[in-house]
Image (cartoon, helix red, strand yellow):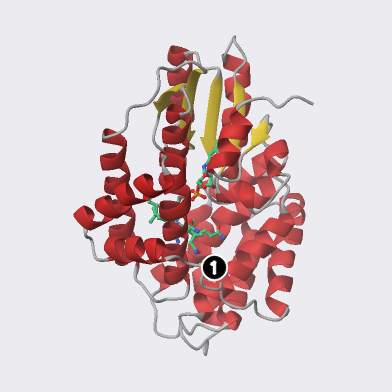
Amino acid sequence: MSVVIARRIRDQAQVLADDAARRFFGDNPDCEGWRDCEATFLAEESRQHLAFLAGAIELSREAAFASYVRWAARVLESRSIPRSCLAGILRATEAALLEHLSPAEFASVAPAVGAGLAALAVEPESMPAEQAASAAIDAFVLACLRGERGAASTLLADAVHRGGSLIEAYASVVDPALREIGRLWEVNQITVADEHTATAVAQVAMARLHANLAPPEPHRGRAVVTGVEGELHQLGALMVADVLEMDGWDVRFLGTGTPLRDVVSAARGHSPNLVAISAMTLMTAPSVRRLVTELRASLAAAPRIIVGGGAFRHDRTLWRTVGADAFGEDLPGALQAATPQNP
Ligand code: B12
């Protein structure tokens, strides 16, 4: 039932979001910050909330929707949009759902929306604190934000020389640097364009580093690493692919946003012993469950299936809900999850 309702929300997202935007203007004429913006902008806001809501409904994760709403409030407040605006668009979205869903369907989504609205009634969370940084992280962040591919590549190569391994360089520099870039965007100190530049530069530096490394002969088995349908975050999965390869896996990396059927067909071709799936947010976590189910049904030699990414780091039991064999929090965790542990 929850899967069907989530699909209805996704299928009707544009109609619901347009309806919510119209209602918002009617009910919140004075909302400071959003007074002058266009209906399409508000509809886009509502669409994002609906996408996260559909994820929460499909996986029965009301609390995760509430924590998403708290995050959204922080992002808006850092842009001087008060949480009353977010409450307004959520209430308008709720009214659109009431209008377009059947009473039984609405009854199933109302608790999650209610949890989201209740989350706005409590004290605002403080902004994410600056991470404990190092000179190496700061320098890499700066090079990425400035679009300096050469400098970023050199800094990353230096990190390998210092730490002695790819995993060390990724874990001590790239991973914290990208999180810092996410934080800077969240607190409105950099733009989306800055973040895109930084991500692209980080990816170039990773690729250059990889080109100069000699992975060992594969001896652990075959692995497929992928992000799911709808997922745009790719670097975490790429890092996992690289460290698995350096650990002796024969890795096929499928990128991210890969359609479910194509992942399954690639997995059939590669006959993996291990499938590693990445999802960053609640929005795409349901695709992980669908993919795990499909892989288990389609592959004769049952591979070990491990998951990771933000969606699982923020919700520590979600990996079980999606039917995975294990979850890895970070790169050492990914290597650990890849190999079944003795009891
Ligand atoms: C770069 C980036 C983007 C880029 C991604 C480009 C690319 N080519 O990858 C773009 C612009 C596309 C993007 C889009 C969005 N993003 Co974004 N993004 C980021 C950012 C800044 C960095 C992501 C990253 O690479 N992190 C570094 C990697 C190494 O971390 P990681 O993926 O978690 O991987 C580690 C572990 O999780 C683990 N792991 C990962 N995968 C796997 C798999 C397995 C099997 C295992 C075992 C382990 C494992 O190992 C890795 C190493 O430790 C983050 C900030 C952050 N905190 O990460 C935000 C962030 C993730 N994004 C966020 C959001 C909200 C979005 C959007 C919804 C924004 C929007 N309104 O459109 C969209 C969603 C798009 C989509 N459909 O997926 C939020 C999520 C918040 C939340 N509550 O869910 C974040 C946290 C930003 C923030 N501070 O608010 N984003």
Residue under numbered circle 1: 20
Disc 1 marks a residue whose amino acid type is: Ala
Q: Nearer the viewer, residue 198 or 53?
A: 198
Q: Please state if 217 lies on the left or on the right of 228 as rendered.
A: left
Give the quarter of the figure containing the N terminus.
top right
The residue located at (23%, 57%) in the rendering is 151
Observer-nearest of 221 and 228? 221
Which corner quadrant of the image does residue 270 belong to?
top left
Tell me if I can see residue 79 in this picture: yes
Residue 210 sits in quarter:
top left
Give the residue displayed 59% in from the left and 23% down from the top. 294
Binning the other alpha carbons within 10 Å of mark 1 as few (below 14), some (14 to 19) or many (20 upward) gives many
Q: Is residue 38 above or below residue 19?
A: below
Report the residue that reaches farthest toward the right: 343
- Residue 76 to residue 264: above or below: below
Nearer to me, 171 or 207: 171
Which residue appears at 42% of the width and 40% of the height?
165
The x, y position of residue 153, in whole percent, is: 26, 50
Q: Locate residue 168 relative to residue 303 in the image: left or right.
A: left
Asked which secondary structure carries label 1, the reply is helix
Horizontal side of 109 relative to 333 (left or right) equals right
Residue 42 appears at what percent x and percent y? 46, 71
The percent coordinates of residue 22 (x first, y second) are: 50, 72
Q: Position of residue 21 (x, y in %)?
A: 50, 70
